[in-house]
Image (spheres, helix red, strand yellow):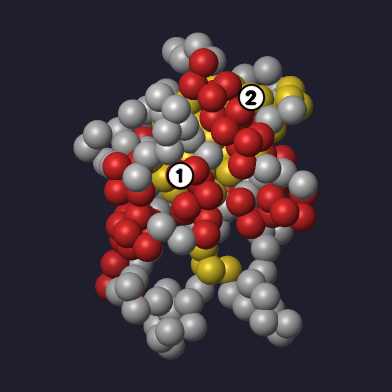
Amino acid sequence: MRNPFFNPWKPPGFNGTLILGESCPKGDETSGITGWRAHPDSEWPHNFIIRHVEEKRLQDDSTFRALRSSFVYDGAVLESVAFWDAHAFSNLVPRLMGRRPSGKFERPGARDKEPAREQFRLILEDVQPSRVLIASAWGTEVLKDLSDTHKYDAVQEGWQMAFDQRPAIGIYHPQAWNQQGYSIDQARRATALLRTLPTR
């Protein structure tokens, strides 16, 4: 079996829920491959995501805080370390996103479609999740025809699919929530629905 480009974050206390993002930006802190001081080039690419989650579960900033806050267990949102000690994570795009001349980071595009689809299959084989949250409208669009039914159902909370009888819900990436008029309440309804769907 081939390994994914990035070793996914899969903690010992994994609860069966895999969260998939789109991509990571290349840092501007160093001139190395990753550009990030927290991500040594010697660990690129295999341990990049693992190191990334180790750092972000302590920082609990923006995207990672929004993802964590999207899940409610017994009426409460888990504290960051506890949350990431139970959920798996990886990104679909097997590269880092550089900056455009405008200074904004590039977005996944047509050249990333097939690599993302290939990585998705490898990540599923590696992680063996019970359910998947795809936190990316782009990722949902790219993966939707791989769904067991070769279609997806648009629901108020997101897009409902299944892969090898594993339920999946696609939602907007947290950085797009304001632009798309998507709310934390919708994200919470999506994850609540995801946890009620039958698994294989």
* Image side of residue 55 versus residue 134, left or right: left
Estimate the x, y position of residue 15 in percent, counting from the top left. Answer: 33, 29
The residue that mark 2 highlights is 161
Quadrant including the N terminus:
top left
Picture mark count: 2
- Amino acid found under the numbered disc labelled 1: Arg
Q: Is residue 102 above or below residue 175?
A: below
Foreground residue among 140 and 3: 140
* Image side of residue 197 versus residue 160, left or right: left
- Amino acid found under the numbered disc labelled 2: Met
Q: Residue farthest to the bottom?
A: 31
Foreground residue among 131 and 111: 131
Say which residue appears at 57% left-offset and 39% top-offset.
134
Q: Is residue 91 above or below residue 163?
A: below
Q: Tell me the quarter of the picture where residue 200 sits.
A: top left
Q: Is residue 171 above or below residue 160?
A: below
Tag 1's secondary structure? helix
Q: Tell me the quarter of the picture where residue 48 sits.
A: bottom left
Estimate the x, y position of residue 104 in percent, counting from the top left. Answer: 67, 75
The residue that mark 1 highlights is 68
